[in-house]
Image (spheres, rainbow, N blue to C red):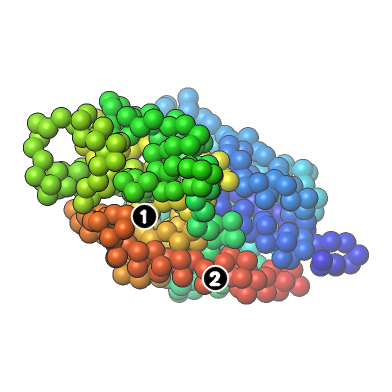
Amino acid sequence: MAEEAGRRRRAAVVVLGDIGRSPRMQYHSLSLANQAGMEVDIVANGGSDPHLSLRENPSIHIHEMKSVQLSGISKISGALALLLKAAIQFILLIWFLCFKIPRPDVFVVQNPPSVPTLAAVKLVSWLRGAKFIVDWHNFGYTLLGLSHGRSHVIVKVYFWFEKHFGRMADGAFCVTKAMQHELAQNWGIKATVLYDHSPEFFHPASLTEKHELFCRLGRSICSAMGSADCFSVEVEDENTTALTSKIDGGVLLKPNRPALVVSSTSWTSDEDFSILLEAALMYDRRVAATLGEEDSMDEGQLWIDIKNGKQFDYPRLLFIITGKGPDRNKYEEQIKRLKLRRVAFRTMWLASEDYPLLLGSADLGVSLHTSSSGLDLPMKVVDMFGCGLPVCAASFSCIEELVKVNKNGLLFSTSSELADELMMLFKGFPEECDTLKSLKDGALSTGSSSKWSNEWETNALPLVNQVIG
């Protein structure tokens, strides 16, 4: 336990967003408490519950701010709504950081969003005699540019703000070497690369954990999003799920079970979800053609045959898509209109304790993240590797810092390429799919080679100690 001047050191972790959807900042908080021996105050918006390990940690104190919604004004003037929202958020941040929490030794701030967070924290750090570290996840101006265009005056002002106040920090972390280079060369910021790694509660699930999870999710899995599909005929009880059976106290995976494919998304414009929908449709059509099935065949009878144990060279695919975000309803409507024979989609939001279990129970992960800046990496892929889950990831400039082709995953640029990969990986599933098994071994090796606590102690703790002095 670190002591300074007779008192325990203290950190404030600042997230102008839902802390339950900010895993990296949750992990920072746990490491500051458990590895640096500090008291930790999290100042963030509410919305989703953070992981149980945070909620039960006596050294971590969560202070929830209310989210600012100005939907009425935004209909009249988007620019005015942005300015008013930033002003209100600035006042809220000042109030919480100055008066609602004890004086910290250091603020650790998530960026983006940059406005008004960086200015508010810089001002409070000066007023309270604290230090200020920015954790660069991405560049806020590039995200704003997705909706307004890089040449828009608002985006240019945002860029100036982000760069100006970012340079005033006492220290910085970033998520890739490419981002470190950009910050050093063009922003004048010296940042320490702190790669995302999954914490210890991300691991492959046991058979019992899988069965219990699928029992909890049974109703969601068997309820079709639109008309009936290949999973709505399944009957589930405490001994049988769509993927597992419990016999004489032991759990078995069904030999004709579907392949479980998981994707986590924020349903935003930097992830083109239509690629996954098109790839799923192509897989469905290509399998039917490969097996010589006619378009007019009785799908209901096929689903009953599969339910009763019939196996084919290519499995059914169950896509479970987790996450919240603005485009979710739009894509759910598109899913409902799809006519699929061997593929089904389910969208859901899981408890923070169930999400690692889902990844640890799946057969393949899909990442559609392409990065607005081209310089950050998808945290979801890190979590998947932590659970020994191989990944098909959308290709962009620095993704190969994380996904090693033919070792722990594959890359794709189009829906057709993704469909090809699904066909190749799942032929002969579940027993005769050697490429998938090889990628799974590689993902497990990647995930077990280093965990967040090791990465944080090696690269983050020295900077925190140096900044605090």
Of marks 1 and 2, which one's residue comes earlier in the chain?
1
Residue carrying label 1: 364
Q: Find residue 285 and report its horizontal and vertical position in percent.
A: 15, 43
Q: Find residue 107 and report its horizontal and vertical position in percent.
A: 69, 58
Q: Is residue 110 visible?
A: no
C-alpha separation, residue under disc 1 versus residue under disc 2: 21 Å
Residue carrying label 2: 450
Query: Which one is in front, 100 or 160?
Result: 100
Circle nearer the viewer, 1 or 2: 1
Q: Is residue 246 visible?
A: yes
Q: Where is the C terminus found, in terms of image quarters?
A: bottom right
Q: Amino acid at mark 2?
A: Ser
Q: Amino acid at mark 1?
A: Leu
Q: Residues within 10 Å of mark 1 (few under 14, many from 20)?
A: many
Left or right: where does residue 373 sit relative to residue 55? left
Residue drawn 44% across and 42% down?
245
Query: Which one is in front, 441 or 58?
Result: 441
Instruction: Give the structural element (helix, strand or loop) at label 2.
Output: loop
Left or right: where does residue 86 sit relative to residue 303? right
Residue drawn 38% across and 54% down?
363
Q: Find residue 455 and report its horizontal and vertical position in percent.
A: 59, 70
Query: Which one is in front, 140 or 322?
Result: 322
Left or right: where does residue 371 sit relative to residue 19? left
**Residue ranking furthest to the right:** 6
Query: Which one is in front, 462 or 333?
Result: 333
Q: Find residue 406 and report its horizontal and vertical position in percent.
A: 31, 70
Query: Disc 1, disc 2: CB below 8 Å?
Result: no
